[in-house]
Image: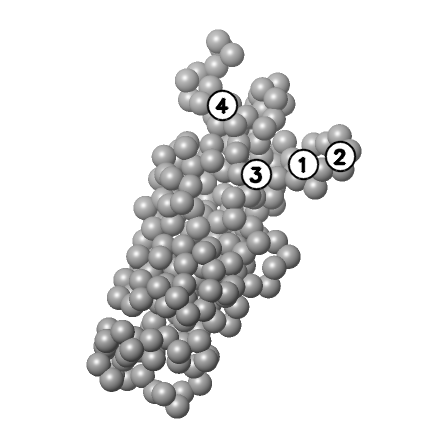
Amino acid sequence: MHKLSRTNRDKLQQYVSITGASEKSALQALKASDWQIEAAFDVFYSQPQPKSNDPYSDMILAEGVSVLCSDLQVEPQDIVTLVLSWHMNAATACEFSREEFVGGLQALGVDSIGKLQEKLAFMRSELKDEQKFYDIYSFAFGWAKEKGQKSLALDTAIGMWQLLFAEKEWPLVNHWCDFLQDRHNKAISKDTWAQLLEFARTVNPMLSNYDAEGAWPYLIDEFVEYLYDKSVVDK
């Protein structure tokens, strides 16, 4: 360890923290990849692993993701972690498979934690792009829901809407969340998730262009009535 440069010591520590590998295995992988972290992950995960009945043995789980966020100097609940997961095409929040993690780093064109950190500003800027925001929003439903569930738990959906619409700045988001808690109190379907974004994009906050005869889901029609009842907008 004393022969390593400060940069390489940092890479070794990051690698061990994220993968859970021993220092010996991490050192071998990093040396074999000329100290390029992204390539080192490939080396580590391509090595024959002891047979395990643990389905998560090839995963970076919540603890590793927390360490990664710490290394990137972002909070785990920062929306940029959602954008990063979108780039990695992660199936589930707070975990990455080897393929997802390495593939995401390759797609972003980075080979170190430092370079990944330099990409954070770019990833934040992607939320300002209309099409990318739509893609990230659509991705978020499957990413945030519990494994094996078709719908998104209401509290999770509300948290995600507040996070996403803080970027999109939809003035009615808090009223929508209050309405769901007051009148709905059920899990959110994929269709409702998708249609809510379409409503926010196409119907102005004063509802002057809202078409009561349109093909909106029943829940959104009920939300409009809720806004009228609460005098949030004039009928």
Q: Which residue is mark 3?
A: 61
Mark in the foreground, 4 or 2: 2
Helix, strand or loop at mark 2: loop
What is the x, y in percent for residue 210?
A: 31, 83
Q: Pointers 1 and 3 in contact (CB under 8 A)?
A: no
Q: Amino acid at mark 2?
A: Ser
Query: Are there few (<14), some (14-19), or many (20+) residues within 10 Å of tag 3?
Result: some
Residue depicted at x 57% and y 47%: 100
Which picture quadrant has residue 57? top right
Give the CA distance from mark 3 to mark 2: 16 Å
Helix, strand or loop at mark 3: loop
Q: Which residue is mark 2?
A: 52
Give the CA distance from mark 1 to mark 3: 9 Å
What is the x, y in percent for residue 31?
A: 57, 23
Q: Which residue is mark 1?
A: 57
Residue 139 appearing in the image: no
Query: Are there few (<14), some (14-19), or many (20+) residues within 10 Å of tag 4?
Result: few
Q: Amino acid at mark 4?
A: Gln
Q: Pointers 1 and 2 in contact (CB under 8 A)?
A: yes
Residue depicted at x 41% and y 59%: 158
Of pointers 3 and 2, the one earlier in the residue sequence: 2
Give the CA distance from mark 4 to mark 2: 25 Å
Q: Amino acid at mark 3?
A: Leu
